Amino acid sequence: MTKVAPSANSKTGQENASDGYMRSIIIIGALFFIFGFVTWLNSVLIPYLKIACELNDFQSYLVAFAFYISYLVMAIPSAWLLKKTGFKKGMSVGLLIMAVGAVIFVPAAMTRIYELFLLGLFVQGTGLAVLQTASNPYVTILGPLESAAKRISIMGIFNKVAGSLAPIVLGAIVLSNADALVESLGTMNAAEKAAELNALAAKVITPYLVIVAVLIVLAVLIYFSSLPEVDTDQEDETVAAANTNKTSILQFPHLLMGAFALFLYVGVEVMAGDTIISYAAYGQGIPFTEAKFFTSVTLIAMIVGYLIGIAAIPKYIRQEKALQISAVLGVLFTISAIMTEGYISVLSIALLGFANALMWPAIWPLALADLGRFTKIGSSFLIMGIAGGAILPLIYGALSDAVDSQQAYWIMVPCYLFILYFAIAGHKVRTK
């Protein structure tokens, strides 16, 4: 049989499709970069607002609560919004909501009202809930299913590189001379203290105005971009025959345990990244000039974990085995942080980034396995699990005030032990 060479038109079509795919990957990568940058600014905002608004530990960790509780509150409304707008327009809306949240930081800084800061963080989290609900499945369906894990890992690296830069950038602006300021506040009268704290609060205005501008520009670019719109409703038809005897998402115990495992994972991940600066400065006496870099070290450790996962899974190790190893490492590093002092203790918290790296990509597929037509609502359950980043750091803050910031890390051990159980047995539990 004579082979027919592809025409110039077909070749051009393939090249255009390839170019469109790469443009889409770059645009979504930029979104994940923004996710990471905005999310991990909280690690600096916690000690910064503790000083500027004169807070205790519990109050300062309301930063994480206000930000992450939005995922619990807004996961279902986000899914409804995306059904109305589609993925592409929904992403633009999410970015604009984030911009509104960043704008709220300006009057918050000018008045030094902590509740306004928390409102701004909740609104930013709401925008991120919309973006996460759209972008996580979008990455999966953007290209071939067999390469979805690779795309998710690449996006994770975008996310964590941005997260490692964020605390360095914001810390250099708002925590400069923080050690000297904290030391001198006790010697000032009320008027002098108010003036100094107002000046400290004002430092956050310019960086957040820059963030507003970037978010608006990115929203416009995505709205007018060539990102393809994908109809995911068709997927339900292809799996309609699955789980015909099931009537409720509550009939999938492995999903419910997976959502709880994700809740605990996000909680310990946020604790590792967001508490480390305050813990180093207030718990171990390390100057802010050095402590402000430790969140970046935590996220670099996560990036190393991602790279190992890309290379090793599933070629050398199954994802459930990787989750088991990660949970055991989480227990060991936590105990090390509690039993040691100084830089070794702080480094042990940073190494939790490595232990946590493969948990998100491992929990998702194990929890969603065999859901069939319930996959979408199952995904919403998992997104709601991100609220662990709101609840667990707040409990840590209360324990830190009641006992001390080092012993409060014991809260992490049962979290990792449940994740270990889910990795060994929980993900296999099914109802008939």
Image (tube, rainbow, N blue to C red):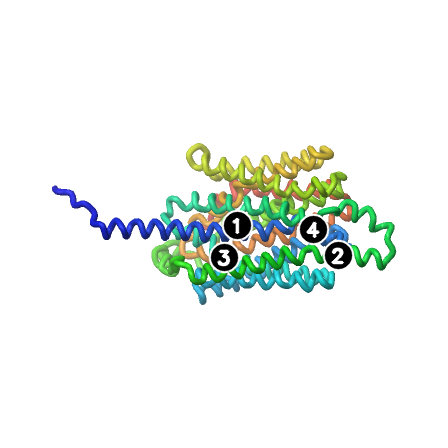
Q: Which residue is mark 3?
A: 133
Above or below 99: residue 382 = above
Residue 298, numbered label: none
Residue hosting label 1: 33
Q: CA distance from mark 4 to mark 3?
A: 31 Å
Q: Report the mark closest to the observer, 1 or 4.
A: 4
Q: Is residue 47 left or right of residue 138?
A: right
Q: CA distance from mark 2 to mark 4?
A: 10 Å
- Camera-nearest label, 2 or 1: 2
Residue at (21% x, 47% y) in the render: 6
Q: Horizontal and vertical percent for residue 298?
A: 61, 40
> Nearer the N terminus, badge 2 or badge 4?
4
Q: Determine the secondary structure under disc 3.
A: helix
Element carrying mark 1: helix
Label pair 2/4, CB-CB below 8 angstroms = no
Q: Say few, some or many: other residues with alpha carbon within 10 Å of mark 2 (under 14 / 14 to 19 / 20 or more).
A: some
Amino acid carrying mark 3 in the image: Thr
Reply above or below: 169 against 101: above
Mark 4 neighbour class, 10 Å CA radius: few under 14, some 14 to 19, many 20 or more:
many
Tag 2: residue type?
Ala
Residue ID at (65%, 39%):
349
2 or 1: tag closer to the N-terminus:
1
Q: Residue under circle 2?
A: 199
Quadrant in which the N terminus is drawn? top left
